[in-house]
Amino acid sequence: MTVRKAWIWATVAVGAALSLVMLLVAGVYVVAGNLANGLGRGPVGLAKNAVPAAYASLVQRWGNMCGAINPALLAAQLYQESGFSPNAKSPAKAEGIAQFIPGTWAIHGMDGNGDGRADVWDPRDAIPSAASYDCKLASYVKDAPGNPTENMLAAYNAGAYAVIKYGGVPPYKETQNYVKTITTLAKSFAAPVRRVDPSKQAAGAIYFAQKKLGTPYLWGGDGTAEQGGRFDCSGLTKAAYESVGITLPRVANDQYNAGPHPKRAELLPGDLVFFSDDLTDSRAIRHVGIYVGGGYMIDAPRTGAVIRFDPIDTPDYFGATRVTEDGAKALPTPV
């Protein structure tokens, strides 16, 4: 095939793809108006591979320790505290995957793995201890009016006395924000029990990404003037959603937790799609794009390439996230 013919066929293909995208983008608004909000009710399981495989069974088991918690909520707390890092240590001397301070660990630390030693650095001890501590807090405030889970989280942040004194979540901004953050973040770790609602901002995010087609890739690129308007993969997705008022984290594996996770068959335009060499661990995600329909995404693939349409059905496809405004706000931000 001559270069000229190849170019013509490529132009036709891109034009057809763009037409398909515009039809699908329009469909986002239609579907958005027809679906109710929320994840639904029922037993809470973990979304596939949302928790690193090394800890998933621990979180699933101990997340059902009492009625005030569930596996997704426990996962959200661990992610918020340490990003699932068993070696995390904060300036306040909080330690391990569950970020216990020494005084709290001395009282509430458990020998979860039965080796005769309660080790704050061992997730097999720290994760059961985190669940047990949550349940103890829930028992302290069980007679307070309101939602037992929200009261437990408020006790975690402000102390049980404050929850009892105010008859529920106390009127402290920090505590109210903490309760909202963890309950919202938990949705990104929960396996959806029904179809996940589409984002109303999805069409705008796609529109932004479309305008960047053909732009050369730049590692670490955020699209600034100094960078010549170039992006890397997560820089593009961050800028696309920022254009519609949603601020995402900078890196792909944190963007994965910006909302619930639709199944492959349920993807809609605007969903973020993720890729990894380790399909058991969301923390190992290395690439992200914006789904446009028909099995394709817009992405900034690698050095030497340009922002383009790429297929998503590859062996390293990890999963997808339907971005929500509250989900993005709940994500930890780097200090």
Image (tube, rainbow, N blue to C red):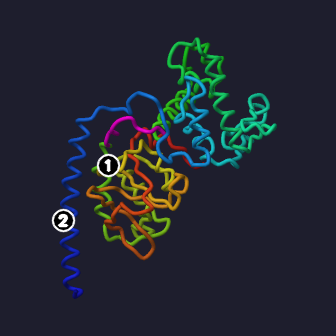
Do tag 2 and tag 1 residues touch (Cβ < 8 Å)?
no
Secondary structure found at label 1: helix
Q: Is 171 above or below relative to 254?
A: above
Q: Quadrant of residue 207?
A: bottom left
Question: What range is drawn magenta here?
Answer: 189-198
Q: Which mark is residue 16?
A: 2
Crowd band around label 1 with a 10 angstrom C-alpha radius: few (<14), some (14–19), many (20+) = few
Residue of label 1 = 265
Q: Is residue 192 magenta?
A: yes
Residue at image point 51% right, 53% down: 253
Kindly report which numbered mark, 2 or 1, lies closer to the viewer in this rendering. Answer: 1
Q: Amino acid at mark 1?
A: Ala
Crowd band around label 2 with a 10 angstrom C-alpha radius: few (<14), some (14–19), many (20+) = few
The answer to whether 197 appears left or right of 260 in the picture is left
Q: Is 132 above or below relative to 99?
A: above
Measured as percent of width and height from the top left, residue 307 is found at: 35, 68
